[in-house]
Image (spheres, helix red, strand yellow):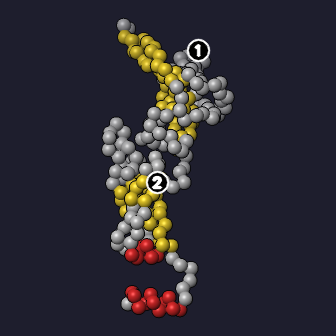
Amino acid sequence: MRLTRVASQTAKTRNEIHHRQIGPGMFQQMTEQVCEECQNVKYEREGYIVTVDIEKGMQDGHTRCCNLHHLVVVFLVYTRSRTEVVFYDDGEPIIDGEPGDLKFRIRTAPHDRFRREGNKLHTTVTITLVQALVGFEKAIKHLDEHLVDIGSKGITKPKEVRKVKGEGMPLHFNNKKGDLYVTFEVLFPSKLTEDQKVEIKAVLR
Protein backbone atom coordinates (compact mmCIF):
# COMPACT_ATOMS: atom_id res chain seq x y z
CA MET A 1 0.00 0.00 0.00
CA ARG A 2 1.14 3.57 -0.54
CA LEU A 3 0.25 6.02 2.21
CA THR A 4 0.06 9.66 1.12
CA ARG A 5 -0.08 12.31 3.80
CA VAL A 6 1.15 15.74 4.91
CA ALA A 7 3.38 15.62 7.96
CA SER A 8 5.50 18.02 9.93
CA GLN A 9 9.22 17.43 10.09
CA THR A 10 9.31 17.15 13.85
CA ALA A 11 7.10 15.25 16.24
CA LYS A 12 7.01 14.33 19.93
CA THR A 13 7.31 10.62 20.52
CA ARG A 14 7.41 8.23 23.46
CA ASN A 15 8.77 4.70 23.69
CA GLU A 16 6.56 1.67 24.35
CA ILE A 17 8.01 -1.77 25.10
CA HIS A 18 6.39 -4.90 23.65
CA HIS A 19 7.27 -8.59 24.04
CA ARG A 20 6.79 -11.13 21.26
CA GLN A 21 7.30 -14.89 21.46
CA ILE A 22 9.61 -16.08 18.69
CA GLY A 23 9.98 -19.71 19.80
CA PRO A 24 9.44 -22.16 22.67
CA GLY A 25 10.57 -20.32 25.78
CA MET A 26 12.05 -17.51 23.65
CA PHE A 27 10.78 -13.95 23.70
CA GLN A 28 11.88 -10.82 21.89
CA GLN A 29 11.64 -7.36 23.47
CA MET A 30 10.83 -4.59 21.03
CA THR A 31 10.82 -0.85 21.63
CA GLU A 32 8.30 1.10 19.56
CA GLN A 33 8.25 4.89 19.21
CA VAL A 34 4.70 6.24 19.41
CA CYS A 35 3.77 9.68 18.07
CA GLU A 36 1.91 11.95 20.51
CA GLU A 37 1.13 14.75 18.05
CA CYS A 38 -0.03 13.41 14.71
CA GLN A 39 -3.74 13.74 13.92
CA ASN A 40 -5.85 11.25 11.99
CA VAL A 41 -4.44 10.69 8.53
CA LYS A 42 -6.18 9.72 5.30
CA TYR A 43 -4.52 6.90 3.36
CA GLU A 44 -4.71 5.94 -0.27
CA ARG A 45 -4.34 2.25 -1.15
CA GLU A 46 -2.18 1.75 -4.26
CA GLY A 47 -0.20 -1.44 -3.71
CA TYR A 48 1.94 -3.06 -1.04
CA ILE A 49 4.75 -0.56 -0.47
CA VAL A 50 4.53 2.53 1.73
CA THR A 51 6.34 5.37 -0.06
CA VAL A 52 7.40 8.45 1.95
CA ASP A 53 9.05 11.55 0.48
CA ILE A 54 11.85 13.26 2.43
CA GLU A 55 11.30 17.00 2.61
CA LYS A 56 14.07 19.50 1.98
CA GLY A 57 15.81 20.64 5.14
CA MET A 58 15.11 17.46 7.10
CA GLN A 59 17.84 17.09 9.73
CA ASP A 60 19.13 14.38 12.03
CA GLY A 61 16.47 13.44 14.58
CA HIS A 62 13.50 14.74 12.62
CA THR A 63 10.64 12.29 12.21
CA ARG A 64 7.76 11.76 9.86
CA CYS A 65 4.80 9.97 11.41
CA CYS A 66 1.79 7.98 10.41
CA ASN A 67 -0.98 6.79 12.69
CA LEU A 68 -1.12 3.24 11.40
CA HIS A 69 -0.47 1.20 14.56
CA HIS A 70 1.40 4.24 15.94
CA LEU A 71 4.43 3.52 13.78
CA VAL A 72 7.14 6.16 13.42
CA VAL A 73 9.77 6.12 10.67
CA VAL A 74 12.92 8.03 11.67
CA PHE A 75 15.06 9.52 8.89
CA LEU A 76 18.70 10.22 9.68
CA VAL A 77 20.91 12.43 7.55
CA TYR A 78 22.68 9.49 5.88
CA THR A 79 19.45 7.75 4.81
CA ARG A 80 19.64 6.88 1.12
CA SER A 81 16.92 6.87 -1.50
CA ARG A 82 15.22 3.47 -2.00
CA THR A 83 16.12 2.40 1.56
CA GLU A 84 13.45 0.12 3.02
CA VAL A 85 12.32 0.34 6.65
CA VAL A 86 10.44 -2.81 7.68
CA PHE A 87 7.90 -3.19 10.49
CA TYR A 88 7.53 -6.93 10.88
CA ASP A 89 4.01 -8.39 11.28
CA ASP A 90 2.37 -4.97 10.86
CA GLY A 91 1.15 -5.54 7.32
CA GLU A 92 -2.15 -6.94 6.15
CA PRO A 93 -2.89 -10.58 6.97
CA ILE A 94 -3.37 -13.10 4.21
CA ILE A 95 -6.57 -15.16 4.20
CA ASP A 96 -6.59 -17.34 7.34
CA GLY A 97 -2.91 -16.54 7.86
CA GLU A 98 -0.42 -14.42 9.73
CA PRO A 99 -0.03 -10.70 8.98
CA GLY A 100 2.66 -9.69 6.54
CA ASP A 101 5.29 -7.00 6.96
CA LEU A 102 4.78 -3.27 6.51
CA LYS A 103 7.54 -1.68 4.40
CA PHE A 104 8.43 1.97 4.03
CA ARG A 105 10.46 2.74 0.92
CA ILE A 106 12.23 6.10 1.01
CA ARG A 107 12.25 8.24 -2.12
CA THR A 108 14.43 11.35 -1.97
CA ALA A 109 12.99 14.45 -3.64
CA PRO A 110 15.39 16.21 -6.06
CA HIS A 111 17.26 19.20 -4.63
CA ASP A 112 17.63 22.41 -6.62
CA ARG A 113 21.39 22.74 -6.01
CA PHE A 114 22.81 19.39 -4.89
CA ARG A 115 22.73 15.87 -6.29
CA ARG A 116 23.52 12.88 -4.10
CA GLU A 117 25.51 9.87 -5.27
CA GLY A 118 25.96 7.51 -2.34
CA ASN A 119 27.91 9.52 0.22
CA LYS A 120 29.11 11.98 -2.42
CA LEU A 121 27.45 15.30 -3.15
CA HIS A 122 27.59 17.06 -6.52
CA THR A 123 26.84 20.68 -7.34
CA THR A 124 27.42 23.06 -10.26
CA VAL A 125 28.67 26.63 -9.90
CA THR A 126 28.82 29.29 -12.64
CA ILE A 127 31.68 31.81 -12.74
CA THR A 128 32.60 34.60 -15.15
CA LEU A 129 35.37 34.38 -17.73
CA VAL A 130 37.42 36.90 -15.76
CA GLN A 131 37.08 34.79 -12.61
CA ALA A 132 38.08 31.70 -14.56
CA LEU A 133 41.26 33.40 -15.78
CA VAL A 134 42.47 35.36 -12.75
CA GLY A 135 40.95 33.49 -9.80
CA PHE A 136 38.12 34.34 -7.45
CA GLU A 137 36.83 34.17 -3.89
CA LYS A 138 33.52 32.39 -3.46
CA ALA A 139 31.58 30.38 -0.86
CA ILE A 140 28.41 28.34 -1.30
CA LYS A 141 25.74 27.38 1.22
CA HIS A 142 25.62 23.72 2.15
CA LEU A 143 22.43 21.77 2.90
CA ASP A 144 22.55 22.85 6.55
CA GLU A 145 23.35 26.47 5.57
CA HIS A 146 27.03 26.44 6.60
CA LEU A 147 29.40 28.04 4.09
CA VAL A 148 31.88 26.06 2.00
CA ASP A 149 34.84 27.87 0.43
CA ILE A 150 35.28 26.99 -3.26
CA GLY A 151 37.50 29.92 -4.28
CA SER A 152 40.56 29.57 -6.50
CA LYS A 153 43.75 31.54 -7.09
CA GLY A 154 44.51 29.94 -10.43
CA ILE A 155 42.85 29.28 -13.77
CA THR A 156 39.57 27.36 -13.81
CA LYS A 157 38.65 25.50 -16.98
CA PRO A 158 35.06 25.03 -18.19
CA LYS A 159 33.56 21.78 -16.82
CA GLU A 160 36.44 21.45 -14.35
CA VAL A 161 35.53 19.37 -11.29
CA ARG A 162 37.10 20.01 -7.89
CA LYS A 163 36.74 17.90 -4.78
CA VAL A 164 36.07 19.44 -1.37
CA LYS A 165 37.01 16.75 1.13
CA GLY A 166 34.62 15.95 3.98
CA GLU A 167 31.71 18.07 2.70
CA GLY A 168 29.56 15.21 1.40
CA MET A 169 26.91 13.13 3.18
CA PRO A 170 27.64 11.46 6.55
CA LEU A 171 28.63 7.81 6.46
CA HIS A 172 26.32 5.28 8.11
CA PHE A 173 27.34 4.67 11.76
CA ASN A 174 30.49 6.72 11.24
CA ASN A 175 31.60 10.23 12.16
CA LYS A 176 33.24 10.69 8.75
CA LYS A 177 31.64 12.25 5.69
CA GLY A 178 31.90 11.79 1.96
CA ASP A 179 33.21 14.48 -0.38
CA LEU A 180 31.62 17.35 -2.28
CA TYR A 181 32.34 17.62 -6.02
CA VAL A 182 31.97 21.06 -7.59
CA THR A 183 31.64 21.37 -11.38
CA PHE A 184 32.45 24.84 -12.74
CA GLU A 185 30.61 26.38 -15.66
CA VAL A 186 32.29 29.42 -17.23
CA LEU A 187 30.02 32.22 -18.43
CA PHE A 188 31.43 33.67 -21.66
CA PRO A 189 30.46 37.14 -22.94
CA SER A 190 27.89 37.13 -25.73
CA LYS A 191 29.96 39.53 -27.85
CA LEU A 192 33.14 41.64 -27.84
CA THR A 193 33.99 44.99 -29.38
CA GLU A 194 36.92 45.27 -31.78
CA ASP A 195 38.93 47.15 -29.14
CA GLN A 196 38.29 44.38 -26.60
CA LYS A 197 39.44 41.77 -29.09
CA VAL A 198 42.67 43.67 -29.66
CA GLU A 199 43.28 43.99 -25.91
CA ILE A 200 42.62 40.29 -25.30
CA LYS A 201 44.99 39.29 -28.10
CA ALA A 202 47.66 41.56 -26.65
CA VAL A 203 47.29 40.04 -23.18
CA LEU A 204 47.12 36.39 -24.22
CA ARG A 205 49.70 36.53 -27.00
State the SS at label 2. Answer: strand
Q: Position of residue 14 (x, y in %)?
A: 49, 20
Q: CA distance from mark 2 to mark 1?
A: 56 Å
Left or right placement of residue 68 versus residue 173 in this view: right
**Could you classify mark 1 by the number of other residues whose Cα lies within 10 Å: few (under 14), some (14-19), or many (20 or more)?**
few
Disc 2 marks a residue whose amino acid type is Lys
Disc 1 marks a residue whose amino acid type is Asp
Disc number lying in front (2 or 1): 2
- Up the image or down, 156 lies above or below 121; here it is below
Q: Residue at x 32, y 44 (%)?
A: 176
- Up the image or down, 40 lies above or below 127; here it is above
Please say whether residue 119 is visible from this viewpoint.
yes
Q: Residue at x 48, y 28 (%)?
A: 86
Numbered label attached to residue 96? 1
Left or right placement of residue 38 versus residue 160 in this view: right
The answer to whether mark 2 and mark 1 are in CB contact below 8 A is no
Please say whether residue 47 is visible from this viewpoint.
no
Given residues 93 and 19, the one toward you in this image is 19
Q: Residue at x 45, y 76 (%)?
A: 130
Q: Position of residue 65 (x, y in %)?
A: 56, 29
Q: Position of residue 181 (x, y in %)?
A: 40, 58
Q: Quadrant of the N terminus?
A: top right
Left or right placement of residue 99 versus residue 137 in this view: right
State the SS at label 1. Answer: loop
**Could you classify mark 2 by the number of other residues whose Cα lies within 10 Å: few (under 14), some (14-19), or many (20 or more)?**
few
**Which quarter of the figure has residue 162?**
bottom left
Q: Quadrant of the C terminus?
A: bottom left
Numbered label attached to residue 141? 2
